Amino acid sequence: MSTIPDGFTSVTPFITFDDTTKAVEFYKKAFGAVEKLTFPAPDGTLMYAEIQVGTARLMMGMPCPETGAEPTKLGGPPFLFMFMWRMWKPHLRKQKMQV
């Protein structure tokens, strides 16, 4: 069983935007992106979205100060989400960390 969800790669970009709704629309117009999954915020804007551009899946969302995901603080670079839990689990055990 793979730890990588269908449609994703082992390393998937997660990009934060101040306005995820506008970002999704831009990607759709500029690159022909297809919305795969969206989670609206209480105010109706998009809190989180997954889009497909060709064979690439991108995750995007609103800034989240609790996790440090703020484009203004990071200068705009994406996070890289890594689906590698099975690889890290033995290492974490060696380090006597709870998993």
Image (cartoon, helix red, strand yellow):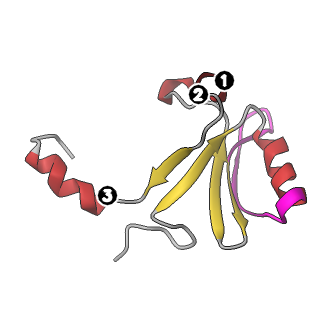
Q: Is residue 35 magenta?
A: yes
Residue at 80% across / 38% down in the picture? 44
Residue 97 position by quadrant: top left
Mark 3: amino acid: Trp
Q: Position of residue 27 (x, y in %)?
A: 81, 55
**Which of these two is toward me, 53 or 51?**
53
Mark 1: amino acid: Thr
**Which of these two is toward me, 35 or 53?**
53
Query: Quick check: marks 1 and 3 in contact, CB under 8 Å?
Result: no
Residue at 35% across / 59% down in the picture? 84
Q: Which label belongs to residue 74?
A: 2
Residue count near mark 3 (Cα–Cα under 10 Å), binned few <14, some 14–19, many ≥20: few
Q: Earlier in the sequence, mark 1 or mark 3?
A: 1
Residue 22 position by quadrant: top right
Image quadrant occupied by the N terminus: bottom left
Q: Position of residue 42 (x, y in %)?
A: 73, 34
Magenta highlight range: 30-48
Q: Secondary structure at mark 3?
A: helix
Q: Earlier in the sequence, mark 2 or mark 3?
A: 2
Query: Quick check: marks 1 and 2 in contact, CB under 8 Å?
Result: yes
Mark 1 vs mark 3, foreground winner is 1
Mark 2 vs mark 3, foreground winner is 2
Mark 2: amino acid: Leu
**Cα distance between the residues tagged 1 and 3:** 29 Å
Which residue position holds label 3?
Answer: 85
**Cα distance between the residues tagged 1 and 2:** 6 Å
Q: Which residue is situated farthest in the right direction here?
A: 29
Q: Which residue is situated farthest in the bottom direction here?
A: 1
Q: Total label count?
A: 3
Q: Which label belongs to residue 72?
A: 1
